[in-house]
Amino acid sequence: MKKNRAFLKWAGGKYPLLDDIQKHLPPGECLVEPFVGAGSVFLNTDYSRYILADINIDLISLYTIVKERTDEYVQEARKLFTPETNDPVLYYQFRQEFNQSTDLFRRAVLFLYLNRHGYNGLCRYNLRGEFNVPFGRYKRPYFPENELYHFAQKAQNAQFFCESYADSMARAKQDSVVYCDPPYAPLSATANFTAYHTNSFNMEQQAHLAQIAEGLVNQQIPVLISNHDTALTREWYHLATERHVVKVRRSISSNGGTRKKVDELLALYRP
């Protein structure tokens, strides 16, 4: 079956893992995603309803605008995908405009431009909350018009929330299934991962997420969590009903230019 791609590029996105995630996601009426990211799981599953959340206000605002003002959004965003705009000087001007703008629609248009023209699909902010990803130097950044329309159509059955994982997981009811894709756990105690948002996701939160999953399964709500397969994640998810190692062998850059290969762990809490 043909997979649907997200309209955003997303470091650590779940598109390569979709077959495994689909295989282990239990049936239900509503899928709750506390870390929606680019939305690959949302776009490639068939639940009646979706609750999609993230702490990144720019992301949730973008999704809401694409859902509610699709044609207007596509028309405006397309204007920034020309040979002339694929230029480092303009990129940094648009990045500065994005960081200074308070207009939600304009920010949403610029967010897609920055995502597709910036380095490696990264979404990164400094401690002042300013987007700081450098120019990506792509020959011809792709304008994802079909993907935008597909997202907007599917989003009619979705609610978007900018909130913490604990708050969105609290929305899960008896007919819900929860899929969690938290920021990756570090590969070692000394690994220094750049925060995805200004609020980094620490070890206590990783462990807390597992505790919430344990609580939900006691309420007959299944939870699937994906993360690196490490000694720490196995410890956090030791009460999961099933643990599956997925041979993705994701390459992770580390110090000294070497690249480690890391398997993915899918931990399923099933009632």
Image: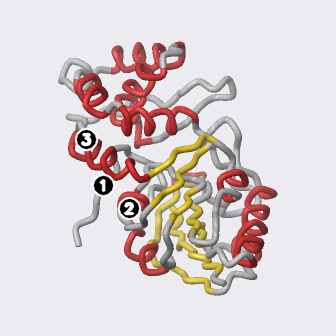
Q: Quadrant of the C terminus?
A: bottom right
Horizontal side of residue 47 vs 74, given as left or right: right
Q: Position of residue 69 (x, y in %)?
A: 34, 30
- The answer to whether mark 1 and mark 2 are in CB contact below 8 A is yes
- The answer to whether mark 2 and mark 3 are in CB contact below 8 A is no
Residue at 50% x, 74% y is 28
Q: Which residue is mark 2?
A: 15
Q: CA distance from mark 3 to mark 1?
A: 9 Å
Q: Which residue is mark 3?
A: 144
Q: SS of the residue at dot 2?
A: helix
Q: CA distance from mark 1 to mark 2?
A: 7 Å
Is tag 3's residue or tag 1's residue first in the polypeptide sequence? 1
Q: CA distance from mark 2 to mark 3?
A: 16 Å
Q: Residue 224, located in which quarter of the rendered image?
A: bottom right
Q: SS of the residue at dot 1?
A: loop
- How many numbered tags mark residues here? 3
| Residue 231 in sight | no
Is tag 2's residue or tag 3's residue first in the polypeptide sequence? 2
Q: Which residue is mark 1?
A: 5
Horizontal side of residue 20 vs 207, given as left or right: left
Residue lying farthest to the right in this orientation: 204
The dot on residue 55 is: none
User: Label 3: few (<14), some or many (≥20) within 10 Å?
Assistant: some
In the image shown, does 200 or 158 lie closer to the viewer? 158
